[in-house]
Image (spheres, rainbow, N blue to C red):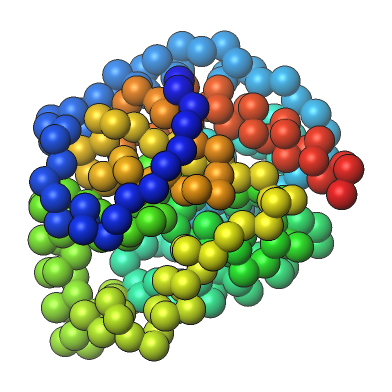
Amino acid sequence: MQYGCGAMGSSTAREHLAAPIQGELRYWPELGRLLAVRSFRAPRRVERRRPILLIPGFLAGDASLTLLAHWLRRRGHQVRRSGIRLNADCAGREFARLQRRLVSFSEPVIVIGQSRGGTLARALAARHPDSVAAVVTLGSPVLDPLAVSPAVLRSVRMLARLGDLGVPGVFSTRCRDGECCRAFDGLLRDPLDPDVVALAVYSRSDAIVDWRACLDPYAECVEVRGSHCGMAVNPDVYRALEHVLDRAEAATCTR
């Protein structure tokens, strides 16, 4: 793993990614390596750790983060899901729903999001610093949500056309610059409260998202070797998570 951070311009949203799409097939080797790690199967458990809210990625649902949820519960965390079955709705509407879920917790939580879910997690942390103890983004293009591969961008445009036709639960072309997502977009650029522990995980060989769009200037940026789809099953990601989860526990004790 490598640590660092930086920024990018919005022009990279249309650049062709250098990483070959075949690299996303590494999901299965990553999963195999994770299952062989003893600290994943039997992590150090501490009762009543800080609660966690998980948010899945684009076109994924809560089930995609099942292994991560089970590991967190084995560590002693109370884990709640986002309630998302298919992450393709208007970001503004989804953000409003997640805000209601966030305030249902009785104490500050750790929010972890993969890909598009990480942009929603980041917005929650910026908007509700008193309710979020830590935020973790996994391969999330927080600096430019459209900094994605051409194939993914085609899927985004196709879904937006369906939204324009009135298909429920799908964003539309109006979301790009519309009032519905204006507040959400602003929160992706807002500074994070210094008391909120923030981790942004990225991979230079990510074939879905431009890794430069993941470099949140207000977070600790950690590079891992692996695929975009495998962020939630990559052993290096879990090592980074252990580090930041422990930091979040210690930081909230001193608030």
Q: Is residue 218 above or below residue 159?
A: above
- Image position of 252 (left or right of 229): right
Residue beneath the point at 36% across and 17% down = 32
Residue beneath the point at 51% across and 13% down = 37
Q: Quadrant of residue 175?
A: bottom left
Q: Quadrant of residue 131?
A: bottom right
Q: From the top left corner, tell me how far across and down residue 151 is, in percent.
A: 11, 52
Residue beneath the point at 54% across and 74% down = 97
Q: How many numbered marks, from 0 up?
A: 0
Q: From the top left corner, tell me how far across and down residue 61 is, in percent.
A: 39, 55
- Image position of 164 (left or right of 37): left
Q: From the top left corner, tell me how far across and down residue 222 is, in percent.
A: 48, 31
- Image position of 27 (left or right of 244): left
- Front position in the image: 12 or 136: 12
Q: Quadrant of residue 132?
A: bottom right
Q: Is residue 168 above or below residue 202?
A: below
Q: From the top left corner, tell me how far across and down residue 5 is, in percent.
A: 46, 38
Residue 45 in sight here: yes
Q: Is residue 165 above or below residue 126?
A: below
- Front position in the image: 189 or 74: 189
Residue 167 in sight here: no
- Front position in the image: 18 or 33: 18
- Quadrant of image for the N terminus: top left
- Image position of 161 (left or right of 132): left
Residue beneath the point at 19% across and 64% down = 156
